[in-house]
Structure formats: structure tokens, C-alpha cells
């Protein structure tokens, strides 16, 4: 398993240090925006003309009399936001402010001020300008309103505030008086019309009464009197109901008696229809039965006395039966008589109803006219009451609807612009906008920022991190503080090899200017300084740069060998480092642009693998030229250089896909041109080594001085 090819880390939440890193990186943007906003706010504040304010307070009440009338309802005079808001709009209305403009001659005064001598503002312009100078605010939970007016002159602000309050007060008083008079006049006109309607309705009622011959004894009453036919119908219907109830009750009792047996009938009829004779016969029968029982016990059943008693009992029973039949016959006759009486009443009721309906139809116009007359009379009375109430209300003293509590006075200190506040807001807004813009730019920046970005998006390990402003190691020397970054890259590259025979490396990048040529040169230099035979091949045939770094000629090189114009020994050049050789690109004829894909190039790579321990190929950007893809497919290993915060991540991903598509072996990524001063997260990769070796260099002279001073003592002691 490859120890350097790790899986992409999980995306984690941003830490506070990540936010701080963004602020440090984008500090130029933040500072520029901050200064721009602060300077702009300061200049605008200093340029704006000074404005003075003056404030007056008024108390606003509804139009309520001091004496409550009978029909008047008292309103709660507490805080009412709707009432106060309505009065705000009234104060700023044209009816109120036009009086202020007229009394103070503001059209001419402001016209001369803003338009020039002799110019006069239009009504709408003066009104708009005056509204812009007025600010209204309520005093919470009270009926007070603060009228604040702003002006460039303190005296004008005072006069405007007082005039607005006075104009509003006068408007309320005139409005209340005018509305009251108009209301009474309108009511008086309505009363005259109503009285005419009442007279007309009364004439109509009298005419209908005479024409229809209606005996309405109290025609002037609030409700009509019941007619004779209706009274007769009511009595007949009441009598019918009583007769029907009596008939139903007695018929039900008779039918119940008829359903009984003779013995039961004899027992029940005294209760249902009490009769003295029947009661007497029943008592005699009871006495006779008792006597019969007594003498039967005394004489036996065969005896003249017993026979006489039996005859007496039988005679009594016959009389009782006859009496019961008579009673039943009487009850039946009475029920029949009630039935006949009920039928007669039904006929009379129906006749009375017919007469009543006829009279009702005949008298309906009269009663409708009378009802309409009553309504008109009641409405006329209400109007009379209302007029009387309004006249009384007009004469009753009322609380002042608008009262000026505090008059405006001139304020010698300007209130606008508030310079400390504006500058403070400029500072705060500048910081907020600057930081917000920095984070927005950071959000839009999809370039590579961290090692995690590379490993997460490209799924490839980062083999080396190269700091910013790295020079050529051959010029800086082996003790250069930047050399350690390339030594780390060299070590990781060696560990990434799956086979020690893999010794040809192509360094590619997605776009131009990512530092791949410098990376090739310095990485080859580090390999050469470790006593390995190294060759640098400049394969960027279109824009070669390595010969400029070595300060050698580019007249002979790779193209001359591939075109079989020169031998390999003739085109390879030596450098100041004995173990480092260089093969320049040479001049590229326009007819040989695809020369790197030839068999001669593959043979060259095979030969160079045999002669050198490591061979490094510089290449053009892989996104624009096919040469880099060809090299990646022919060499053993490929390194992709990505410059810190230069190109978008999708471009780097596409470059990796091109390498893999042609069969190249991408062993890792080199993250180049890291700004260590801005991004402390990379300090460990380069800054640590710089500090470490700097301390060692300071300690070595001291150690050498100490050893020299101690040597004589050792020799003496020896």
C-alpha cells in the first residue's frame, strides 16, 4: 500500500482560525473598502450643510363637550395610535400647510433662495419642501404630539414650528364650528321635508278611513284597534275549542264505559256518572246480600225467609241493571248533543273567518297607511330631538381640541449632520462591508487554497509545499532556506515510487505561470546535490525557459536530436554542478510540432533512463498543448504543479483527468507559491525549516569559538 496516497479528508466545519486566515489574506481588500467608506462618509458629512431644529409640543383631544348630553357617549381619552396617526396626516395635509406657506410667504422666500432673485416656487414645490422639513412624533401613552422642524437657519426653524402648530389649531377649531353649523342646517331641512311627509300621510289615512268605513275608535293610537269581526271570530273560536274539549272528554268516557262488562260497569259508573238512586240501590243490595247470608246460615237454603230474601236481592239487581242502562242512555244522548253543538260552532267559525278575511283585505290599505304615518311621526320626533341636542351642544363650552403646550425656541447648535455619529457609522459600515466583501470574494474564489482542497478535489496526495518567491537553488546554494522544501518533495517522490527502476519524471501544470519550470530545475538540483546523476530535459518546445535559468545557449537541443541532426552527446550540456546535465529544447521548426510523439522520442527516453539516475522533463501547460499529455504517457512518473490561489479547481481536476486519460502515472501534487506571511497554516512545511536552520547557523560559530578556547586547556592538561 502506498503510504502517501491517502483518502480525501472529510469536509469539516470552518474554525475561527479559518475566518481569521481569510481576513489576513484579504486584508488589502478590507483595508481599501474600509478607507473608501470612511473617507466617503467623512467627506459627505463635512460637505453637507448644517441644519438646525426647533420643536413645539401640542396636546390633541377629540371634539368632546365639557357637559355630557343625554344621547352622547363619552370616549376614552387615552392613547389611541389610530387617532394620533390620523392627526399626523392632518398636520402634514395641504389644508394646514398651505396656510403656513401663505402667512410666511415661503414661495417667494424659498424661490429667491433656491431659484434666484425674482423667482417664485410653485405651490406643490413649496408644499413638498415644507413637508420634508417637518418631523412628527407622539409622546407615548399621551395625547401629546411633538412637531420638529429642520432648517438651515435657527430662527426660521422656530417660526416654522410655531406656525405649523398654530395653523393646525386654527384648522381644528374652524372645522368643528363649520361642521356643527352645517349639520344643524342639514337637520332643519330634513325636518321640513319630514313634516311635509307626515301631513301627506295623515291626509291619506283619513281618506282611507272614510272610504272604507273602518270603525277604528282610536285611530291616532300607536297600533290599530281590533275590528268587530275579528272580536266575534275570537269568541266563536274560543267557544269552539271549549265545546270540542268537553265533547272529546265525555265521548272518551262513554266509550270506556261501553267496553266494560256488566259487573265492571256497575262498579265504575257511580264514579264516572254519579247518581243518588243508583247509589241507594247499591247500598240496599249490599244490605240484602248480608241478610241473605245471615238467614241462610240460620235456616238453611230451603226456608220461606230465605226464599223471600233471594227474591228481594234479585229484584234489587234488576233495578240496578235498569238504572245503569238508563244512565248510559243519558250519557250517550248528552255526547250526541255536544257533537251537534260542536258541528254548529264549526260552521259559525268558518263563516266568521270568511267575513274576517274579507274585512282584512278591505281594511289593509288603511292600516298600512296608518303604520307608515306612525313611522314618519316617530322619525320626525327623533329629528326634533337631534336638532335640540345639537343646538344645546353648540352652546355648551368645550375643551380646547388643540392646545400648544410648549412653543418652539431657536436652537443655536446644529443637529445635522451628526459628525461623530456619521463617522462612527462609516467606520462600522466600512468594516462590515470590507469583511463581507472579503468573504464574498473568498466564496467566489474556487482556486486551490489548502492541502485539503487538493486532496479532496483531486484525490491525490500533496508531495510538496513550495513557499513564495523561491529562487534557483544553484544560485542560492545548498544551505538555502528554501532547499528543505524541495528535499521534502524529493523524499516524498522517492517513497511514492513503486519500483526503483522508475526514474523519468515529467512535471506538468494546468495553466501557464504556475512555476513548473522552477520546480523542475530546483527538484533536479536537489537530486543532483545528493550525488545522483541527473538530467534536465526542456520539453517545452514552444516557450522554453530552462536555458535562461542556466544561462546557456538554446541553439542545440532536443529537437536537433529528434530530427537526427546531432548526436546525444552533442546536445547534452553540462552545468556548474558536476552531477547535473541539461538538454535544451532547441529550435522547433513549424513543420515538426508533433515531434514528441515520435518513436525517436521514446527511444531517447529509454536511452536516458539507462544513462542517468533520474531524468526530469519540463513540459508546456497540459490544458493548451498536447505535448504535456504525450510526455505524461511516455515517462514513468508525473508530477502536477498547482499554484496557490491562481486557477479554479475544475481546471486542475481537468488537468489530472487528461494525465490519467493518456495512461500517465500521476504520483502526486506540488503546491507552489505559498504566501507564508498570509497563511500561517503552511508555516510547518517551510517556515519551520527556515527558523530551524537559522538557529543552527547562529549556534555553530559560537560552538566553534568555544572549542578553540578550550583546546589550549586540553593540551595543557594533557
Image: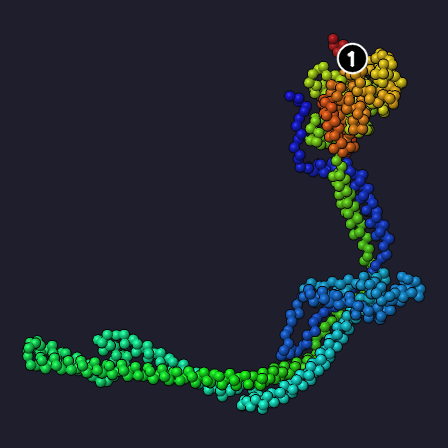
Q: Which residue occupies the foreground of this view, 41 or 3? A: 3
Tell me the quarter of the image containing the N terminus. top right
- Asked if residue 272 is positioned above or below residue 513 in the image, the reply reads below
Whether 410 is drawn above or below 341: the answer is: above
Expressed as whole percent of the image width and height from the top left, the position of residue 208 reads 59, 88
In the image, residue 550 lies at what x, y percent? Answer: 86, 19
Q: Is residue 12 visible?
A: yes
At x 93% / y 66%, what residue is drawn?
A: 118
What residue do we see at 74% from left, 10% from top? Answer: 717
**Colour setup of the view:** rainbow
Q: Where does label 1 land, which residue?
A: 607
**Which residue is pictured at 82% across the width and 55% down the height?**
417
Left or right of 529: which side holds 224?
Answer: left
Percent position of residue 384, x then y: 65, 83
Q: Is residue 410 left or right of residue 249?
A: right
* Residue 483 makes an appearance in the image: no
Amino acid at each position: 500500500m502506498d503510504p502517501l496516497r491517502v483518502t480525501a479528508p472529510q469536509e469539516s466545519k470552518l474554525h475561527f482560525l479559518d475566518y481569521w486566515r481569510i481576513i489576513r489574506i484579504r486584508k488589502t481588500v478590507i483595508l481599501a473598502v474600509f478607507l473608501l467608506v470612511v473617507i466617503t462618509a467623512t467627506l459627505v458629512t463635512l460637505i453637507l450643510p448644517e441644519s438646525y431644529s426647533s420643536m413645539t409640543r401640542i396636546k390633541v383631544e377629540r371634539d368632546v363637550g365639557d357637559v355630557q348630553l343625554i344621547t352622547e357617549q363619552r370616549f376614552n381619552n387615552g392613547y389611541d395610535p389610530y387617532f394620533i396617526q390620523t392627526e399626523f396626516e392632518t398636520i402634514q395635509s395641504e389644508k394646514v400647510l398651505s396656510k403656513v406657506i401663505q402667512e410666511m410667504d415661503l414661495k417667494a422666500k424659498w424661490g429667491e433662495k433656491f431659484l434666484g432673485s425674482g423667482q417664485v416656487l410653485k405651490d406643490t414645490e413649496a408644499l413638498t419642501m415644507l413637508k420634508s422639513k417637518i418631523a412628527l412624533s407622539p409622546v407615548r401613552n399621551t395625547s401629546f404630539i411633538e412637531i420638529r422642524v429642520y432648517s438651515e437657519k435657527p430662527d426660521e426653524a422656530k417660526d416654522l414650528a410655531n406656525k405649523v402648530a398654530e395653523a393646525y389649531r386654527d384648522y381644528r377649531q374652524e372645522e368643528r364650528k363649520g361642521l356643527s353649523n352645517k349639520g344643524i342646517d342639514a337637520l332643519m331641512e330634513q325636518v321640513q321635508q319630514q313634516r311635509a311627509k307626515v301631513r301627506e300621510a295623515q291626509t291619506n289615512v283619513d281618506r282611507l278611513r272614510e272610504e272604507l268605513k273602518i270603525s277604528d275608535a282610536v285611530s291616532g293610537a300607536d297600533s290599530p284597534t281590533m275590528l268587530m269581526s275579528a272580536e266575534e271570530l275570537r269568541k266563536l273560536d274560543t267557544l269552539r275549542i271549549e265545546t270540542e274539549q268537553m265533547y272529546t272528554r265525555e265521548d272518551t268516557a262513554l266509550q270506556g264505559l261501553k267496553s266494560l262488562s256488566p259487573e265492571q260497569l256497575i262498579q265504575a259508573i257511580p264514579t264516572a256518572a254519579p247518581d243518588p238512586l243508583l247509589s241507594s240501590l247499591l247500598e240496599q243490595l249490599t244490605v240484602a246480600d248480608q241478610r241473605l247470608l245471615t238467614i241462610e246460615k240460620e235456616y238453611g237454603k230451603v226456608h220461606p225467609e230465605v226464599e223471600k230474601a233471594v227474591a228481594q236481592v234479585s229484584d234489587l239487581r234488576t233495578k240496578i241493571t235498569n238504572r245503569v242502562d238508563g244512565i248510559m242512555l243519558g250519557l250517550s244522548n248528552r255526547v250526541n248533543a255536544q257533537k251537534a253543538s260542536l258541528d254548529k260552532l264549526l260552521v259559525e267559525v268558518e263563516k266568521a273567518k270568511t267575513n274576517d278575511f274579507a274585512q282584512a283585505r278591505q281594511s289593509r290599505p288603511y292600516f298600512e297607511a296608518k303604520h307608515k304615518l306612525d313611522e314618519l311621526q316617530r322619525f320626525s320626533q327623533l329629528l326634533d330631538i337631534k336638532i335640540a341636542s345639537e343646538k344645546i351642544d353648540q352652546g355648551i363650552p368645550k375643551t380646547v381640541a388643540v392646545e400648544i403646550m410648549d412653543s418652539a425656541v431657536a436652537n443655536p447648535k446644529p443637529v445635522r449632520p451628526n459628525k461623530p455619529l456619521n463617522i462612527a457609522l462609516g467606520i462600522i459600515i466600512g468594516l462590515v462591508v470590507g469583511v463581507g466583501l472579503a468573504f464574498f470574494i473568498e466564496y467566489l474564489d474556487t482556486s486551490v487554497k489548502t492541502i485539503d482542497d487538493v486532496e479532496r478535489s483531486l484525490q491525490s496526495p500533496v508531495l510538496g509545499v513550495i513557499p513564495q518567491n523561491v529562487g534557483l537553488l544553484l544560485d542560492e546554494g545548498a544551505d538555502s532556506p528554501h532547499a528543505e522544501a524541495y528535499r521534502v518533495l524529493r523524499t516524498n517522490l522517492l517513497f511514492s515510487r513503486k519500483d526503483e527502476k522508475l526514474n523519468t519524471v515529467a512535471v506538468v501544470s494546468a495553466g501557464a505561470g504556475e512555476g513548473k519550470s522552477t520546480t523542475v530545475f530546483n527538484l533536479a538540483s536537489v537530486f543532483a546535490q545528493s550525488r545522483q546523476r541527473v538530467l534536465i530535459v526542456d520539453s517545452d518546445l514552444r516557450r522554453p525557459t530552462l536555458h535562461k535559468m542556466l544561462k546557456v545557449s538554446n541553439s542545440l537541443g532536443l529537437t536537433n536530436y529528434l530530427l537526427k541532426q546531432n548526436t546525444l552527446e552533442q546536445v547534452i550540456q553540462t552545468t556548474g554542478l558536476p552531477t547535473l546535465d541539461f538538454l535544451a529544447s532547441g529550435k522547433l521548426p513549424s513543420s515538426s510540432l508533433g515531434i514528441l510523439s515520435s518513436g525517436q522520442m521514446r527511444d531517447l527516453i529509454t536511452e536516458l533512463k539507462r544513462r542517468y539516475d533520474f531524468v526530469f522533463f519540463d513540459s508546456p501547460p497540459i490544458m493548451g498543448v498536447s505535448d504535456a499529455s504525450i510526455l505524461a504517457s511516455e515517462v514513468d512518473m508525473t508530477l502536477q504543479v498547482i499554484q496557490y490561489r491562481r486557477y479554479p479547481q475544475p481546471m486542475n481536476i481537468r488537468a489530472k483527468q487528461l494525465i490519467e486519460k493518456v495512461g500517465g502515472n500521476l504520483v502526486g501534487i506540488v503546491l507552489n507559491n505559498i504566501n507564508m506571511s498570509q497563511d500561517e497554516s503552511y508555516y510547518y512545511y517551510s517556515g519551520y525549516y527556515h527558523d530551524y536552520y537559522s538557529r543552527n547557523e547562529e549556534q555553530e560559530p559560537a560552538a566553534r569559538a568555544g572549542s578553540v578556547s578550550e583546546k589550549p586547556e586540553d593540551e595543557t592538561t594533557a
